[in-house]
Amino acid sequence: MARHIYPCPLRWSDMDAFGHVNNVTFLRYLEEARVDFMWRLAPGNGSDAFTGGVVVARHEIDYLKPLVHRHSPVTIETWVTEIRAAYLTLRYEIKDEDALYVRAATRIVPYDLDQGRPRRVSPEEERFLTEYLEPDPVKKGAGKAAAKSGGSGDSGGSAGGAGRPEGAVAV
């Protein structure tokens, strides 16, 4: 099982009045790692995986330790813990050699930008994601088996079948 490693530079403007990286900035760091994972790494050799669009349906972030500005980047590890028919879950750790600063998760819903509605995870996307799959030990049935069975009936972000899932934003 592989993890995507993204070296994320810190910027002076990332700090807040308390002298550490602002909590909202961590969302930007996660976005940078996610974009690198899904739009640089996934397409690889001419693949069109994720080019149709995705939306963020949910974020969870646990802030574990303050991060202060320095010249060396932090490492963001990204992996997949769940692949369902209509969504996937990414997990992240933001860390360096000495500390773990953040643990986070993002639920991603594949989205048809032309149709303006959620879509299913394509077979090509599932193949790519499976390379980074580490089922979450806390969730029973997470991962590839759940993707094949469709899970527990969760249709994943259809939001009544119209528009974006509530609270989702295009990335």
Image (tube, helix red, strand yellow):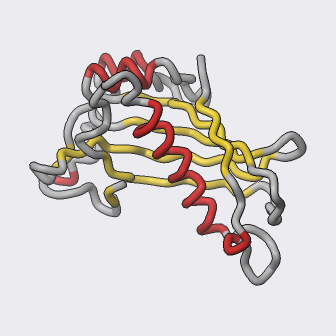
- The answer to whether residue 3 is above or below residue 36 is above
- The answer to whether residue 67 is above or below residue 111 is below
Q: Residue furthest right?
A: 98
Q: How many marks?
A: 0
Picture quadrant of residue 86: top left
Q: Residue furthest front?
A: 45
Query: Residue sitting at 70 percent across and 47 percent down?
Result: 94
Q: Residue furthest bottom?
A: 17
Q: Quadrant of the C terminus?
A: bottom left
Query: Residue sitting at 43 percent across and 45 percent down?
Result: 107
15 or 111, which is in the foreground?
15
Q: Position of residue 65 (x, y in %)?
A: 81, 57
Relative horizontal placement of residue 150, taking residue 82 as reference (left or right)? left
27 or 168, which is in the foreground?
27
Query: Residue sitting at 18 percent across and 50 percent down?
Result: 113
Query: Residue sitting at 32 percent across and 44 percent down?
Result: 109
Q: Quadrant of the N terminus?
A: top right
Q: Position of residue 164 (x, y in %)?
A: 23, 57
Q: Position of residue 143 (x, y in %)?
A: 46, 23
Relative horizontal placement of residue 3, taking residue 51 as reference (left or right)? right
Relative horizontal placement of residue 31, taking residue 155 as reference (left or right)? right
Q: Position of residue 23 (x, y in %)?
A: 65, 67
Q: Residue furthest left?
A: 115
170 or 158, which is in the foreground?
170
